[in-house]
Image: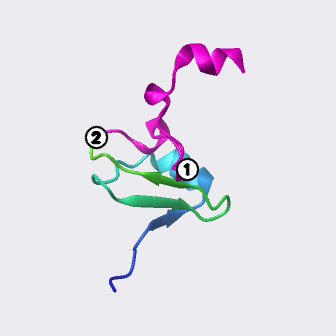
Amino acid sequence: MPSTKYVKYTAAVWKTKNLVLANGQAGLETDTKQIKIGNGMDPWNLLAYYHPGVPPLEELDPVYALDR
């Protein structure tokens, strides 16, 4: 089974470097343990954190979300 390789930095270093990850490439914040998945275009600071099982914001019903 192939191993998963992450680009790893602290949250502060990610914020400063603001790298663009390749499409599907994972980046790990070593201090917060949060992950972002690259799309090959957007820099780190524009990517959302990855949360398995949670749909992207654009797929949520905005009326439902506001009622909560």
Asked which quadrant contains residue 43, the reply is: top left
Left or right? Give the position of 64 relative to 37. right
Q: Nearer the viewer, residue 52 or 19?
A: 52
Residue 11 in the image, given as x and y percentages of width and height: 60, 53
Residue 40 as seen in the image, left or right of residue 50: left
User: In the image, what residue occupies the spot 28% across and 52% down?
Assistant: 23
Task: Choose mark 2 or mark 1, whichever is in front.
Answer: 1
Q: CA distance from mark 2 to mark 1?
A: 20 Å
Compared with 36, 43 (above or below) is above
Residue 8 in magenta stretch: no
How far across and how far down the image is residue 46, in percent?
45, 35
What type is the residue that disc 1 sits on?
His
| Mark seen at residue 51 | 1
Q: Residue at x 50, y 66 (%)?
A: 8
Q: Is residue 68 above or below residue 54?
A: above
Residue stretch rendered in magenta on the structure: 42-68
The three-letter amino acid code for the residue at tag 2 is: Met
The answer to whether the residue labelled 2 contacts the one labelled 1, judged by CB atoms less than 8 Å apart, is no
Is 2 situated above or below 59? below
Q: Position of residue 4 (x, y in %)?
A: 40, 75
Relative height, residue 9 to residue 5 (above, below): above
Quadrant in the picture for the N terminus: bottom left
Q: How is the image coloured?
A: rainbow
> Which residue lies under the disc numbered 2?
41
Residue at image position (61%, 51%) is 12
47 in magenta: yes
Give 32 or 15, whichever is nearer the viewer: 32
